[in-house]
Amino acid sequence: MDQRASKPAPAKGRTTTERVSPKELVVTRRFNAPARLVFEAWATPEIFQRWWLPESFGIKVISCELDVRTGGSYRLVLGHPSSGEPMAFFGRYLEVIPNARIVWTNEEAGEAGAVTTATFEEKAGVTLVTVHELYPSKEALDEALASASSGAWDEQFEQLDILL
């Protein structure tokens, strides 16, 4: 793969994924819903857990704690039938602007964790969501892509689209 950038990956739906630099991945999708509803789906635990995990992964939410505000934190505990131990994903919200922007850390990966920014831009009732993942190194992004964790956006966004 070209280390500088890659072409957008073909997507089943309207989601585009592009590696824009060795350390950065950008995912975009338009939703036929106002920004406040799309933001709410990211900020409300009961809604978030209905779309965040790709169904094809077979993972279930054991617990979901979201304190979506600047300085807040999140913690997801997930289980899979093939794993005896639950998996925890956690981090902090560095910036939250309601209906417009969420920036969070992915601390479960330690030094290899990305900082993720999601923006919500509404025009005429349609919201463009742009997710920007910045990894600390090329190797960290390569590992995330190889594990399929960063490749789940298409399915996640299909689920969110149905929910909205």
Image (spheres, rainbow, N blue to C red):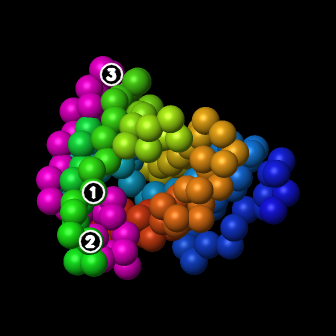
Query: What residue is drawn where x is 65% and y is 55%?
Result: 142
Q: Does 35 appear above or below 15?
A: above
Q: Which of marks 1 and 3 is nearer the N terminus?
A: 3
Residue extent of the magenta highlight? 49-73
Query: What residue is drawn where x is 39% and y is 37%?
Result: 107
The furthest residue to the front:
84
Question: Is 4 on the left or on the right of 105, as rendered?
Answer: right
Dot 2 corresponds to which residue? Answer: 83
Q: Does 133 appear above or below 51?
A: above
Location of residue 118 in the rendering, given as x and y in whole percent from the top left corner? 48, 40
Kindly report which numbered mark, 3 or 2, lies closer to the viewer in this rendering: 2
Number of numbered discs: 3
Location of residue 64 in the rendering, given as x and y in whole percent from the top left corner? 18, 49
Label 1: few (<14), some (14–19) or many (≥20) C-alpha neighbours in 10 Å: some
Are the two marked residues, 2 and 1, in contact with CB atoms closer than 8 angstroms?
A: yes
Dot 1 corresponds to which residue? Answer: 87
Label 3: few (<14), some (14–19) or many (≥20) C-alpha neighbours in 10 Å: some
Which corner quadrant holds the C terminus?
Answer: bottom left
Query: What residue is drawn where x is 59% and y is 40%?
Result: 135
Q: What is the spatial separation of the Cα atoms under label 2 and label 1, in whole angstroms?
A: 9 Å
Please say whether residue 107 is one of the residues in the magenta stretch: no
Q: Does 58 appear above or below 138?
A: below
Residue type at mark 3: give it: Thr
Dot 3 corresponds to which residue? Answer: 70
Q: Which of marks 3 and 2 is nearer the N terminus?
A: 3
Kindly report which numbered mark, 1 or 3, lies closer to the viewer in this rendering: 1
